[in-house]
Amino acid sequence: MFQINRRRLLETSAIALLLSSQSSRAALIKGGIPWKPGAADPPPVVRPGPWHFFTAQEAATVEAFVDRLIPADDLSPGGKDCGCAVFIDRQLAGPYGHLAGYYMSGPFQQGTKQQGPQSSTTPAQHYRTALAALDKACRSKFGGKTLAQLNDAQKDQVIGGLENGSFELDGADSKEFFKLILKNTQNGFLSDPIYGGNKDAASWKMIGFPGTHYDYRDWIGRHNQRVTLPTIGIADHPNW
Amino acid sequence: MARKLRHKDVVIIGLGWTGSILANELTDAGLDVVAIERGPWRDTATDFLISYAQDELRYRLHHELFLRPAQMCVTFRNNSSQTALPVRTWGAFMLGNGAGGAGVHWNAETWRFLPTDFTLRTHLTQRYGANFLPDDMTIQDWGITFDQLEPYYDQFEYLCGTSGQAGNLKGAVQPGGNPFEGPRSRPYPTPPMKQGYGHVLFAQAASELGYKPFPQPSGNLSRSYTNPLGVTLGQCTYCGFCEWFGCANYSKASPQTTVLPVLLRKSNFEARTDCEVTRINLDRSGKRATGVTYVDTSGSEIEQPADMVLLCAFSLFNVQLLLLSGIGAPYDPNTGKGQIGRNFTHQTMSGALGFFDKDKYNFNPFVASGAIGMCIDEFNGDNFDHGKLGFVGGGYIGEVQTNGRPIESTAVPPGTPAWGAKWKQALHDNYLSTIVGGSCHGSMYSYRDVHLDLDPTYKDRFGRPLVRITIDFHDNELKMSAFLTDKYAEILQEMGAAQVVKKPRKGPYDVTQYQTSHLNGGAIMGTDPGNSALNIYLQSWDVPNLFVQGATAFPQNAGYNPTGTVGALAFWSAAAIRSQYLKNPGPLVHA
């Protein structure tokens, strides 16, 4: 039968506190449903302002990158103006950036594709390494210019090369980095506007998602009709 | 030394669906009950607020309501020749955490299994002959029948207020319901949900093809409902944020909306949250549980003595605690001996994308609920002749699109570039006119090699071995999935889809692809200790004052979502404890 090692218990009990939200402490619940005012845990709202994670140079590269992944056209503003770089910056500075909550005990070993990611590298580390390598590679291929300084056709050439692995990065896997930044960009573009990457709910308006309306009872029976409600996100809820 | 608390009549490990139901039943019987829950206390008014519950990034992508792998993880491999590696972030399944357990984040599909599902091996052998089943398929009868369980399905549905259309009332087939279901004693407590455009088109097309479509039984309610405990649920508002999310509207059946408000007011109940049970303690004989030991967030180790232990954690962790506590014999896939870890199963999910002409079709996919949709059951279980098909099993097929959440539920036609202007255009052109949520909810039968045991390498934060999953799809399931997917694709064509993209399940089993959180088996119920870990009342054969609840007991999985059967088994087990065990504590079935 398994017995807990007492020292290990004390060393690791701090993990439990890190994992849980502010309200999570061992509690005795008895005599009714617990309730206290202000117990809710609303999400943090991303504010414009200085970069939290990126350096100015990294930010310029990422803004150029996201603006080609999501180019401005009649359907929506571009990824930069939608805030996708801001979204990624705040995500990398937050729990996601260092894989909070992931199982990060070793040994780390490569498995099959079906066994999922096994790297100990966090997204924050991945961006830091790959962005430096991307600038370096661009400078050497395009006469000292970084990604942000290239024209659109050149940018697309670089990004396409990362996608298929032909544009190599020193110290980073170009295909993996492409997959990461594409996923982060599209997630930011399609997330709630409070997270900074979907300014004015641009993507939701583009596809026809009216947003986080809590009550669609008036619409469930109206088949094949375009919903005419205004597009709202979490921060717009007074518009109900 | 662990601090020792005052003795209780009953200690419950985990306060999800089964823990809440058992706690309520046993406190009604006058027992002093404590539930110990690994995760935090959670409730609608404080944790699932209308003002921010509909947050796809926070709950869907960042898994806020779920168990964190850093707290407890599992390892996975396809077969025993591989080294199992930790599932560092959840993918194929999501594991609940905190009060309410997986009952918080489920979609609330509330199905019953078919009568023949409970007598599966006997039935298939009688119909097709003893040689029809693959040699390594280890399916078996449950030891109870549908008719025995029916009153307890009824009890769970009336607790939840389930919305649906009866298909068979006391043997009389009912129009508009599922004609294949077992006889039910009375109608669903509330009428079926309203359906969206895509769901209705599916039903029309299925009827044209000769099938009998019916509304999916739903734990998101078509109207407000007060259950027998006096707890009231609200009418679903079709907000489209069910699975992965807590319901802000009290309209999804969960422990919070059906049981806990009553349970928490009882003087003979208490819950300890953010407390993780580390083992079940046994006396020197090894045949009697003396209680449990748990750790709270300060790192203190605490012993809770009790006369009875109810193991009500998620299936994987029920098995892990049995193995860590030395209860029962670990299963050995080489010899087939041992019961703990045996007959582990998941679900064989597949579907197809249906792209429709955007100028003619607008499905408003975001107007939905977790268990909305229309289904057919012609190809579930043994409702159809498998004689010439070369496989057994099946599943319900349905247009059950539950949401239009922009990250999860956008699809673009094959060949679309992954980024740039063409990707944007495709997203724009297809979001409202594509059905991405059609489902073939296939069974997964049990096999000799698919099992759970303790990982030799990877440990949890306390140094305990993680549970190791060894699973892959077998040919039987892959053939079945291809068959079901073809049937669904035919219906999509009949609905008028301009392009249908079939997505049959392919091997190997991939732990990064979500395929329901229906993990079953590992400590199954049965008729004797030679074929099961638990008797038919979910009582451990080895430790008779221990009952193990949940889908852990399923000998194999059927072509349905499991929660209806999990709830029914909880009431069935509770009834046996109340009417038999408490009068004469000891084995309810003599081996």
Image (cartoon, coloured by chain):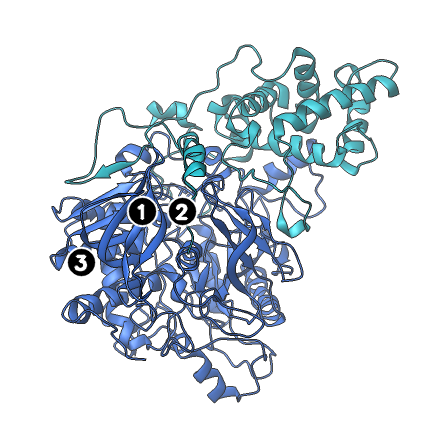
Question: Is A158 left, or right, of B588 in this rendering?
Answer: right
Which subunit holds the residue at mark 2? Answer: B
Specify the amino acid type for callout 3.
Leu
* Residue B319 x, y percent position in the rendering: 43, 59
Between B306 and B570, the one nearer to me in the picture: B306
Specify the subunit that label 1 lies on: B
What amino acid is labelled 1 in the image? Answer: Gly
Kindly identify which residue carries mark 1.
B100
- Count residues near mark 2 (Cα–Cα under 10 Å), then give few for <14, some for 14-19, many for 20+: many
Determine which residue is flagged by label 3: B26
The tag earlier along the polypeptide, 3 or 1, is 3
The quadrant holding residue B19 is bottom left
Drawn colour of chain B? blue
Q: Residue at x 52, y 81 (%)?
A: B385
Chain A colour is cyan
In the rendered structure, are the residues bearing label 3 and label 1 in contact, judged by CB atoms less than 8 Å apart? no
Q: Is residue B514 visible?
A: yes
The kind of residue on which mark 2 rests is Gly
Q: Are marks 1 and 2 in contact (CB under 8 Å)?
A: yes
Could you classify mark 1 by the number of other residues whose Cα lies within 10 Å: few (under 14), some (14-19), or many (20 or more)?
A: many
- Quadrant into which the C terminus of chain B falls: bottom left
Image spot of residue A69 (x, y percent): 68, 29
Q: Earlier in the sequence, mark 3 or mark 2?
A: 3
Residue at (60% x, 62% y) in the render: B472
Q: Give the quadrant of the N terminus of chain B.
A: top left
